[in-house]
Image (cartoon, rainbow, N blue to C red):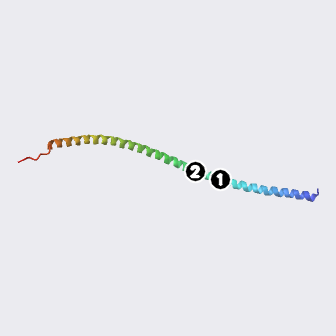
Amino acid sequence: MSPDLIGIVVALAAFCASVLGGVRIMLARQTAALESRFDRIDARFEKVDARFEKIDARFEKIDARFEKIDARFEHLEEKFDDRFVRLEEELSGVKVAIARLEGPLPRLQRL
């Protein structure tokens, strides 16, 4: 092999190594930049998750309040149902009393 050919092969190998080294450095920088962006995005998502947890706690408190209010309404409905039943009974008693006071319809009398 001639010394010129060996020189060309060595120069080509050095050139490829330097190009690949440059590509490696460029990819390393790009990867580091992307990782820092992803870290910032992860930090934002953690903040948003913390907010959602606070909001979920608020909704749980509101749900507990609604359950208490529903229980109150059920209790009131039971009271009103009892009162309406008693009122119906009293009303039917009044109807009977009025019917007794009026008596039967008078018949036509002959003169």
Q: Secondary structure at mark 2?
A: helix
Q: Amino acid at mark 1?
A: Ser
Name the disc covering residue 45, or none: 2
Specify which label sits upstream in the sequence, 2 or 1. Answer: 1
**Residue 32 x, y percent position in the rendering:** 68, 53
Residue 26 horizontal/vertical position (percent): 73, 56
Name, please, the residue furthest toward the left.
Answer: 111
In the rendered view, would you say 95 is above or below 16? Answer: above
User: Which residue of the protein is positioned furthest toward the right in this rendering?
Assistant: 2
Image position of 110 (left or right of 62):
left
Which class describes the residues within 10 Å of circle 2: few (<14), some (14-19), or many (20+)? Answer: few
Left or right: residue 3 versus residue 21 is right
Q: Residue at x 57, y 49 (%)?
A: 46
Residue at image point 65% right, 53% down: 36
**Pair 2/1: label in front:** 2
The N terminus, quarter of image? bottom right
Quarter assignment of residue 5: bottom right
Please state if 40 lies on the left or on the right of 17 as rendered. left
Image quarter of residue 99: top left
Residue 36, numbered label: 1
Q: Quadrant of residue 95?
A: top left
Residue 7: x and y in percent read: 90, 58
Tell me which residue sits at (66%, 52%) in the image.
Answer: 35
Kind of residue indicated by mark 2: Phe
Could you tell me which secondary element the residue under label 1 belongs to?
helix
Disc assigned to residue 15: none
Query: Of 9 and 29, which appears nearest the observer?
Result: 9
Q: Nearer the viewer, residue 111 or 102?
A: 111
